[in-house]
Amino acid sequence: MTGLFRCPLCALPLHAHQASGGWYCDGKHHFDKREPGFWGFAKPAKGKVQGDSRAELRAKHFLLESGILMPAITALAETVTGLAGTDGTLKALDFDCGDGYFSRALAAALPKTLALELQAVTEAENAAFAAAKAKGPAGISYASLKSLPYADGAFDMLWLMDKALKGKDGLRVLKQGGLLVNLAQGPRHLWQLRQYIYGDLSEKPFVANLPAGMTLVSERAVSFTLDLKPEAALVLLEMTPYAWRLKDAMRHQILRGDFSALELDYRIVVAQKA
């Protein structure tokens, strides 16, 4: 991993500290390895939990680990395999990785002949803890997404799973000609659940919201239905950007709903850095 990391405070290269498993730079900044095995490149938040609580992370973990998103994972693996370089190696970063589920599932679905070097980063300390405990990627970092602890152009590919790319630093660590693979929500994603939130819900065309400096390469639809209990459907909804609109009355209605044919609608968007 020599040359992969840089100091998020002063941008100098980071050196491995063999005794502690942490990192240091010539500017005398030190970053330790935390229990149960992630690197801490940011100070712990005081007084406020960033991201999901541990109870919320556990609920999402058990639901996702049941394999309900395997159609999307299989399609992602096919896409990533087709985009990997001819030398059989791939340096990838799971950006804003959450508890690392997509990294774990996607890495397991890729062919064993692909030499994958995978890192993952989150700005939520609870998520980094959960990802490390779940035996996710070998390199899990807790860091600000606005000041990533990686060198310029360190990665061939960025994985962005069901969320938007925040800030400009993600593109900085992607090499020229590198690829962004984004699992984005399609127009009918969780349609039956969103109807509880939006009384006038209408289907709109999908638009790939690409960061400046990225060019669209391809777009692939992956749609399927699930037969879920209301409690599980609610957990899925709480993983989306719509969740902040949920009120207690809506939650009670959802828990009495029928989600035997819940639509999941994704788009696998591939874009290239100019």
Image (cartoon, rainbow, N blue to C red):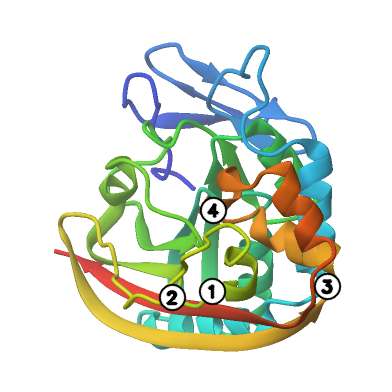
Residue 113's place in the image compared with 184, above or below, is below
Mark 4 residue element: helix
Q: Position of residue 23 (x, y in %)?
A: 54, 27
Instruction: Give me the C-alpha separation between circle 2 and circle 4.
Output: 13 Å
Tags 2 and 1 touching, CB below 8 Å? yes
Q: Position of 69 compared to 77: left or right? A: right
Residue 242: which disc? 4
Instruction: Give me the C-alpha separation between circle 2 and circle 1.
Output: 6 Å
- Badge 2, how many Cα within 10 Å: few under 14, some, many 20+? some
Residue that mark 3 sits on:
66
For the question of whether residue 256 can be seen, the reply is yes
Residue that mark 2 sits on:
187
Residue that mark 1 sits on:
189
Mark 2 residue element: loop
- Badge 4, how many Cα within 10 Å: few under 14, some, many 20+? few
Q: Amino acid at mark 1?
A: His
